[in-house]
Image (cartoon, grey):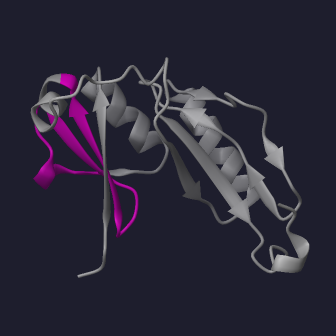
Amino acid sequence: MPKMIFVNLPVKDLDASIRFYEAIGCVKNEQFSGDDAASMVWSDTIVFQLLTHEYFATFTPRPIANAGEAIGMLIALSRDSREEVDAITEAAAAAGGRADIRAPQDMGFMYVRTFEDPDGHVFEPAWMDMSAAAPDNVQA
């Protein structure tokens, strides 16, 4: 079995979140979805588990952070082109998210934009020209 990543995210409105994640390219896995959670497949090895706040709270004794006010992580998503970076960012904005919460970054060999989902979770779709990103070409 390949190693997989399951990103568990607390969401306020499960139906709105499902629509948002479908708009950015995820497919809902009905087998692992229900009234309090939705399994949104990004790829063969990455799944976003959308959990209502009540259900998410059963997995941790810590309070759920307001992702619109504080940040604990950035979720980077690789894309195959600059156009795909733009397309997913625009789809996120059209589906209830917020695009370009910081200025797009264009480093020539790498292009990154940033968006938030309806709950404030931050994503950075990125395209990188790996041949141009050779150690001699990258500035630290």
Position above or below: 82 against 8 = below
The reply, left or right, for residue 105 in relation to residue 49 is: right
Please identify the quadrant where the C terminus is shown.
bottom right
Give the mark count: 0
Instruction: Give the position of the N terminus as an image quadrant.
Output: bottom left
Q: Position of residue 119 (x, y in %)?
A: 41, 24
Residue at 61%, 46% in the rendered image: 124
**Looking at the image, which residue is at 75% across and 76% down?**
130
Magenta-colored span:
28-53
Seen from the viewer's position, the closer of residues 111 and 62 is 62
Q: Residue sitting at 29 percent across and 21 percent down?
A: 13
51 in the magenta segment:
yes
| Image coordinates for residue 99, horizontal then vertical, percent | 64, 30
Q: Nearer the viewer, residue 62 or 96?
A: 62
The x and y percentages for residue 37 are 17, 38
Say which quarter of the image contains residue 5: bottom left
**Residue at (40, 41) in percent of width and height:** 21
Q: Quadrant of residue 8?
A: top left
Q: Position of 73 compared to 31: left or right?
A: right
Vertical comparison of 99 with 49: above or below: above
On screen, residue 69 above or below 112:
above
Is 124 drawn above or below residue 126 in the view shown? above
Q: Is 44 within the magenta?
A: yes
Measuring from the top left, give residue 26's x and y in whole percent: 39, 51
Q: Is residue 133 left or right of residue 22?
A: right
